Amino acid sequence: MLLILRLIRESYIFAFQAIIVNKIRTILSLSGITIGIFCIISVFTIFDSMEIAIRTNIESLGSNVLFVQKWPWSMGGEYPWWKYYQRPEASLDDMREIQKRSTLSEISAFMIDVTKTVKFHGNYMDGVQIVGVSYNFDRVLPFEISDGRYFSPMESNNGKNVSIIGNEIAANLFGKMDPVGRRIKVMGRNMEVIGVIDKEGEDMFGNSNDNTLYLPINYFKSLVDIRNMDATIIVRAKPLVSNDELRDELTGIMRSVRKLKPSADDNFAINETSIITEGFDSFFNTVAIIGWIIGGFSLLVGGFGIANIMFVSVKERTSIIGIQKAIGAKNYFILLQFLFEAIFLSLIGGIVGLLLVYILTLIISYGFDFELILTAGNIWLGAGVSAAIGLTSGIIPAMRASRLDPVDAMRSTG
């Protein structure tokens, strides 16, 4: 243990002296390690932060929620696209049959949307997402209402002309006025505002309830013909029921409702959030490879820089090595001494690279509406890669130093 501490101390001293005595040479040599670590860890940091944000947004939909739709979220194989196109849309009747027959689902809801202009007196807002929903929608995909309330069962079932609006709609149309109880106009119809959704901001996919207006589906049907519109039935599983179990049950129910023969293909899709995450997994794996390639070239240059420093260091300290051997230093002591020095130098370059990444996270987090996080895993990865580069680059110079003849080494003038 004492020997290891002595090696670390001497290696640290020699590495520090190499930086002090040959500042320019050392800085230029370590810049490759710094740039390489910065490239790799910054790429990982950016995409790890994106992945965390994306997974958080996806998980907000619910991991135990399935979506019955016309189109699958992931299309592939030999199934022709025109067969997807010919499928019927999900309908309210389909949802009612699921609610009646399903024993594994906890709650189900229906949703369908269009994009329209919303008006209030002289103010108007374009591009508002008008969503028709069944009564239980807020239990399947919850949202917070900051002012007012959600639809009552009677309002939903009778299709009353009431609405719940997003925070941005309320700000643009009403300013500082209280929207609740006032009437807005959509598609030429007047409807009362009964609730305002709490401000959310956009998620990673650009979606937000801030720009959304909810209507009871039975009122929405009086405004728009929903028969050929892209609709979704959202089904939440009961506790302890797996998505696979619920999927199998829903498949059986939908095939029965659609009166499909045993040999016929499904004419519906049952989607889940794992489809999205699996797609992003392959994307982030590709990005990681790109990051390693970009940073790998800099690390290769940095490795040669560390090797160059160590070869020069061996040459300059040849006589010192001879003296150490003459007083009893073993070959492994000399070897480890130079290896520790190479690792220390490489770690210094890596730490500077990590510091630059940390500064980048502060700039992006405070300058943009996106939180960039330098994780502990990426810090350890940067330090580990730096140490590995130092070890690899220093092994040949260290072996050469350990094999020097003590007599010839002491005669050397450095």
Image (tube, rainbow, N blue to C red):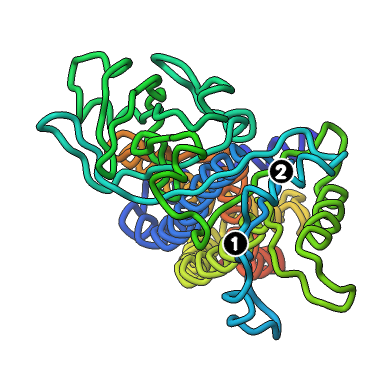
Number of other residues with Cα within 10 Å of mark 2, as a class: few under 14, some 14 to 19, many 20 or more: some
Q: Name the residue under label 1.
A: 89
Residue 375 location (% of width, % of height): 56, 39
Element type at mark 2: helix
- Judged left or right of residue 363, residue 240 is right
Measuring 34% from the left and 50% from the top, which residue is drawn there? Answer: 115
Distance of mark 1 from mark 2, alpha carbons?
14 Å
Residue at the farthest left position? 122
The quadrant where residue 52 appears: top right
Q: Name the residue under label 2.
A: 96
Measuring 62% from the left and 56% from the top, which residue is drawn there? Answer: 90
Residue 40 location (% of width, % of height): 50, 58
Is residue 127 placed above or below 413 in the rendered structure? Answer: above
Number of other residues with Cα within 10 Å of mark 1, as a class: few under 14, some 14 to 19, many 20 or more: many
Q: Pick whichever of labels 1 and 2 is earlier in the sequence.
A: 1
Q: Which of 411 and 76 is in front in this view?
A: 76
